[in-house]
Image (tube, grey):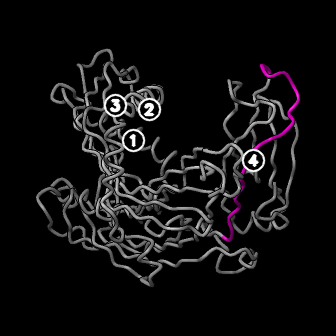
Amino acid sequence: MASSLIAKLTAQKDGEAGDFLNDLVRELWPNINVAGCNMIKEIVEPMFKTMLPGPLKALHFTKLDLGPVPITFSNVTVSRTEADGIKIEMNVSWLGQCSVGLDAPLIPDLGVKSVQLHGRLIVLLCPITNIIPLIGAVQFSFVNPPVLNLDFTGAAEVADLSIIDSTVREIILGIVNSMFTLPNRYFLRMDMTADYFKTYHEPLGVLRITVEKATGFAKESTSKAKKLLAKLTRAAPDCYAKVEVGAEAAWKTSVKDNSVEPVWNETQDFVVSDYDQCIKIDIRDKDVNGDDDVGMAVTTVREIVRGNKHLELPMYLKDKETDGKVSITCEYFSLETANSSFTAEEHRGPNKLCGIANVLVASARNIKGQRDQLKPSVVVTWGAKHRFQTAIIADAPGTDINNPNFDQSFRMLGTSDLMNGSQNIRIALMNGTTEVGASGYRLRKCTKHQR
């Protein structure tokens, strides 16, 4: 599946080789190595304590070096965006020969000797200005969650290697997806006077996916499916489908007990940020000892937008195509500024969206108080379902703590009950845990650029 998924993740019209970028990264790689290692250690080690089980919670780095092989770029394209910015897309590949040491009490020394990373990266340059440096901000994001493989050393002596392998990858990909994978973008301000509202790129639309059924996966397949097939001969599986679009929140269907041809006909809406986002349908067999892989099917949003609304997708298991098929029906809706969908019958009901509220928090001005006593942030709430908070700004050299920039956006998914309800969107300025002031907006009265 990895090779097929990499092909999906990096599919794009022919672009440039990216030799200039590769030469630049090669020269900067020693500096990138140091900065990257420091960031990994600061972010990942605390997450080991919360995500790893038992004695593995104490896992920590004893050595961390990204090695001599730099990241490479290929298939580079450059285009203008509708928001009057510049969009650079490129394939990212890293076959890293790293040197990573991990240690914890009660387990032998463990390390990572190589890393493989593949994905499609978008760099947005906007707004474009007439003042040096000409670019107000840079935003980075992967189109889809990248493919990541780790090659551990000391594997033969560690009974829980599979737990470590899956958890370490989960932590790393979780960080990458939360910061760098659509709909999330890593924001870097280049011009402190740039208008943050002009940097925002709105989502493209909503994709409605109905997972109909899965068939054929119980037939004799490859030798690598023996474990699954042996289980199928004992009892019919209890299958559900896990659906993901890019790095949007995953959705699961109900479990269909004792069926080798499960039928769901269940629907969920997903927000689309890029037409090349992957749609992954992962069929799994629910089990008290851990859910088993049945197979995965993959397509892209672009296939749906092109008019392929009903698809019967082949299922893959352990890198091999099986006899299994997943049937889905999809419908794509472009976003409009009118509120007619609020009451449209086709957008009412469980798991269906009738609108999206985007809240951009640029800055706050004239916060009163001593610098060393201020810890400003902004909390955005909408009903009981949505609560977001910006990062808390800390006093530091170069920071105007009385007039802080937050430069964060929040996206709130609107169902018919929320859109037609009485709940206001509430925006509160906080100092630590104390509310300084707040404003409320009725959604229908909000305009795109209210501040």
Dot placed on the residue nearer the N-terminal end, 3 or 1: 3
Observer-side mark, 1 or 2, equals 1
Q: What is the three-letter code of the residue carrying label 1?
A: Glu
Residue beneath disc 1? 170
Q: Residue at x 66, y 36 (%)?
A: 391
Q: CA distance from mark 3 to mark 1?
A: 27 Å
User: Is 268 displayed left or right of 109 in the figure?
Assistant: right
Q: Residue furthest top?
A: 105
Vertical arrangement, residue 7 with respect to residue 373, above or below: below
Dot placed on the residue nearer the N-terminal end, 2 or 3: 3
Contact? badges 1 and 2 (CB < 8 Å): yes
Where residue 21 appears, as percent x and y from the top left, is: 36, 50
Q: CA distance from mark 2 to mark 4?
A: 28 Å
Residue beneath disc 2? 51
Q: Residue at x 73, y 74 (%)?
A: 337
Vertical arrangement, residue 229 with respect to residue 315, above or below: above
Contact? badges 3 and 4 (CB < 8 Å): no
Vertical arrangement, residue 430 with respect to residue 218, above or below: above
Residue beneath disc 3? 30
Dot placed on the residue nearer the N-terminal end, 2 or 4: 2
Residue range corresponding to the magenta coloring: 354-373
Q: What is the three-letter code of the residue carrying label 4?
A: Val
